[in-house]
Amino acid sequence: MDIEKWLLIFSLGSTILAILSLFYYKKRFDQCKNYSLQRHSGSFQQLVRVAGNVCQEHRNLLNVKDRSVQVPIMISHRTDEEILLNPMLGTGKKNDVGSGRSFMPETLFYKLGGYVIADSAFPKHYVDEGSILFLKGSPRKEILINPNDVKAAIVTCGGLCPGLNVVIRELVMTLWYNYGVKHISGIIGGYPGFYTQGCLKTLTPSIVADIHLSGGTILKTSRGGWNLEKIMDSIIKNGFNQVYIIGGDGTHRGIKNLVDEIERKHLPIYVVGIPKTIDNDIPIIDKSFGFDTAVEEAQKAIESANTEANSVEYGIGLVKLMGRNSGFIAMQASNANRNVNLCLIPESGYELTGPNGVYSYISERLKVKKHAVIVVAEGAAASCLDEKLAAEGTDPSGNPILYDIGKHLKEELVKCCKKHNINATLKYIDPTYMIRTVPANSSDKILCSELAQAAVHGTFAGFTGFSVGNVTGQAVFIPIDLLISIKEGKDAKEGQRRVDIDENMMWWRLMANTGQPSFIND
Ligand SMILES: *[C@@H]1O[C@H](CO)[C@@H](O)[C@H](O)[C@H]1NC(C)=O
Ligand SMILES: *[C@@H]1O[C@H](CO)[C@@H](O)[C@H](O)[C@H]1NC(C)=O
Ligand SMILES: *[C@@H]1O[C@H](CO)[C@@H](O)[C@H](O)[C@H]1NC(C)=O
Ligand SMILES: *[C@@H]1O[C@H](CO)[C@@H](O)[C@H](O)[C@H]1NC(C)=O
């Protein structure tokens, strides 16, 4: 009898408990669903007012005297949502540490947080009004997003660049292990993959474990395919609420449109850009990932050209390197190699013909030194002042098709030498595809990983519409609006960086190394 009575009480009790917890979770679920969002961007005070109510770290920023902190858009639920603690926050108990969580002491969050004074990264007139500060791209102790609710998407756009797979791998690892996100998809083939059948790939740590050892991107990439409506539909249909987009300046302009649209629709979707450009032509950031590897790999081509040039009489070694609008790779690779006698980049005007032109310089040099090593950036036709070297049309990304300056020089140089009675032998090397497909070298791998981690930390802190980059040696969050509007270097377009031939010390070093003159006839 007693047993039956207890059994009855027990089952009644558990039923009531079950009903109560059902209500409780229903309420929490409703709260999570209550996505009436607010946009907080631009003004520092505004951010602190809103975020400071909820987030200790943002409140700490109140002490900053200078108020020109560039804060990305921040979205959060309007309800006084409970703030979650970062899963990486350590408990102080050694047994809790493991699986990428519970390992960071509280003090470290504050040490890593705060802001970076970025003045030296900006062209001078940007900082005339006062310092520019960025928030550090570090993890926040308090996070605004519940990792259990996250469905993340990763996409790579545009041309190949060493390190893409490292970024993909680290995004997956950070989401999975550090934050506990279990729904991660790769979008296959760039932007069109969002709206093309069969282009979703589930990503897990075991799938990405070894991808950093190879070049290219396991997600494949493509140019163009930007279609706001279709991409938006796909994001909503698949329930993605964190979207990581790895791409160049064009891709970043797309991200801005996407973020604006999401804001118009009041959706809780966070979008982050990771700047990818092998040319290193995105402004403010110290260096884009893959650039070092590209410079390193270009050495091999220049060395071959040097050997060819020195192994025959009147030998010319000609190397064409990447750089559509900016000559950073050609310049750095030439500076590193030191056997280059002539380097042409899109930023520095030159003439081919005439007594001071490139042709007569090379033939004079051949007469004396019997060899010449030339490096030319692929976009250098644009800075030719005496001949009109232009191609027509645009590629699918909307970039103008470049006139093939390498091929032009290859044909014309030999002809011109002949006119000067020199039987030159020219060997032409175009290592573009060999360079952009190599795996990233160690220092680039580390940079890729840090950028990917910063991207994830930023979304969990509640930011959207930002990009990550190292600025003055520190990973920071850069609002996309700002990144796509800055012009760095003479004649740069918005969101572009070019070699400033008047002020860039590297360019003057190059002139000193090569001994090349100005190539301008009076
Ligand atoms: C959702 O938001 C609205 C308006 O902000 C508020 O009135 C309502 O109470 C919220 N619902 C829940 C379940 O939090
Ligand atoms: C990667 O390349 C850069 C540029 O040449 C170089 O500074 C760096 O030391 C390289 N890292 C490794 C580990 O080779
Ligand atoms: C160039 O080569 C041709 C044949 O290969 C020869 O006839 C001519 O004399 C050479 N010219 C010079 C300047 O060496
Ligand atoms: C980028 O920033 C991170 C941390 O903010 C730093 O550890 C790293 O050394 C930086 N990398 C470079 C190449 O400056």
Image (cartoon, grey):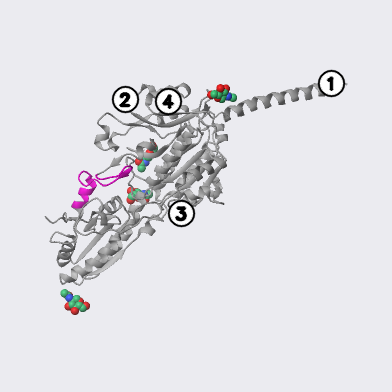
Q: Determine whether the beta carbon of the residue marked 3 sits less than 8 angstroms from the nearest atom of ligand 2.
A: no
Q: Earlier in the sequence, mark 4 or mark 3?
A: 4
Read off the residue under disc 4: 58
Q: Which mark is residue 214?
A: 3
CB of mark 2 within 8 Å of CB of mark 4? no
Between the residue at mark 3 and the residue at mark 1, the CA separation in whole angstroms equals: 68 Å
**Looking at the image, which residue is at 33% across and 28% down?**
68
Read off the residue under disc 1: 5
Quadrant where the C terminus sits is bottom left
52 inside magenta stretch: no
Q: Earlier in the sequence, mark 3 or mark 1?
A: 1
- The magenta-colored residue range is 490-511
Q: Earlier in the sequence, mark 1 or mark 2?
A: 1
Pair 1/2: label in front = 2
Quadrant where the N terminus sits is top right
- For mark 4, give the secondary structure: helix
Compared across the picture, whether 83 is left or right of 352 comes to right
Compared across the picture, whether 337 is left or right of 251 comes to left
- Which residue occupies the foreground of this view, 22 or 59? 22
When the figure is inspected, residue 171 is found, relative to residue 433, above or below; the finding is above
Between the residue at mark 4 and the residue at mark 3, the CA separation in whole angstroms equals: 39 Å
Pinpoint residue 292: horizontal percent, then vertical percent.
Answer: 34, 49
Pinpoint residue 220: horizontal percent, then vertical percent.
Answer: 48, 53
